[in-house]
Every structure is written in C-alpha cells, then in structure tokens.
Amino acid sequence: MSGPIIQNISIPADDDVELNFTLTAGNGATLGPGSEIFFDVYESQFGAPVPAVDPVLTYTLNHGIQITDPDNKLFTVTVNRADTAALLRNYYYETRVVDPEGNSVTCTVGTLTVTGTEIRV
C-alpha cells in the first residue's frame, strides 16, 4: 500500500473547474460499481484541517464526482463556480475512495487555493 499523493491546487473563484484524479495502483482500492468517492475541503491552519470543523465543500460520486475511466482508476471532480465565489484563501482538501470490498483509501491531499479573479483593463 502507498500513502496519498500530495497535490496542491489553485483555482479561480467564481469559475467552474474540473479537477482530474488518479487512484494509484499501489493503494489496494478499485473503482467501479459500488465504489464511493468523496472530495472534502476544510478550513486549514498550518496546512492541516482545523479539528472538529465541518468541510466548507463536499462532493460525492454522482454529485460533482464522476468516474471517467474505471480500468485506469481515473475520476473527475467538478467544482461549481457558486461554491467558490466567497472562498478566497487557502484550504486543506482530500479525496477518499471506498471500494465495493470496503477498502477505504485517502488518495490525494493538499492545499486548495481559491484565488480572486478580476479583469484589469
């Protein structure tokens, strides 16, 4: 088994963004019918989630998350513009997969930065 991939992401506020993820082969989980996938974004402090605070964003399979290629363990998370319009700062995020056999794997963690956007003429 391998640990989660650490991947920092920056997205513009008030934009629809598609994030692509791969479940690595060495972590022992599979994607397919019966799998569950979670993408949670938390307030962060010193690069870690603030304890005992609910996520500021949550997406689940078929509710913002789609498996795009189960054989190659690929899935996407679509972050909706309305969900990020008021979230300007750094957050901690993680993706977790629970496969049909009950294997639970945190596959990716990192900092999600929501940046302000403004057209300057």
Image (cartoon, helix red, strand yellow):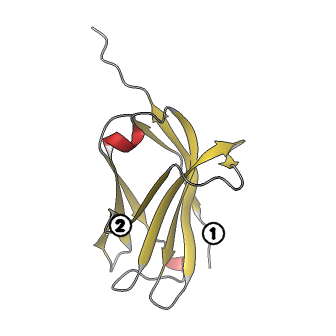
Residue 75 got which mark? 2
Q: Which mark is residue 24?
A: none
State the residue at coordinates (72%, 41%).
46
Q: Is residue 51 left or right of residue 29?
A: right
Mark 1 Cα-neighbour bin, 10 Å: few <14, some 14–19, many ≥20: few
Residue at 37 percent across and 25 percent down: it is: 117
Identity of the residue drawn at 57% across and 43% down: 91
Identify which residue, 90 or 10, lies in the foreground: 90
Total count of labels: 2
Q: Position of residue 45 (x, y in %)?
A: 70, 42
Which element is circle 1 on? Answer: loop
Q: Which mark is residue 3?
A: 1
Pointer 2 local density, CA inside 10 Å: few below 14, some 14–19, many at least 20: some
User: For the N terminus, which image quadrant?
Assistant: bottom right
Please indicate whether residue 104 sits to the left or right of residue 57 in the image.
right
Coordinates of residue 2 in the picture (x, y in percent): 62, 73
Lower sequence index among marks 1 and 2: 1
Looking at the rendered image, the disc whose residue lies closer to the viewer, 1 or 2, is 2
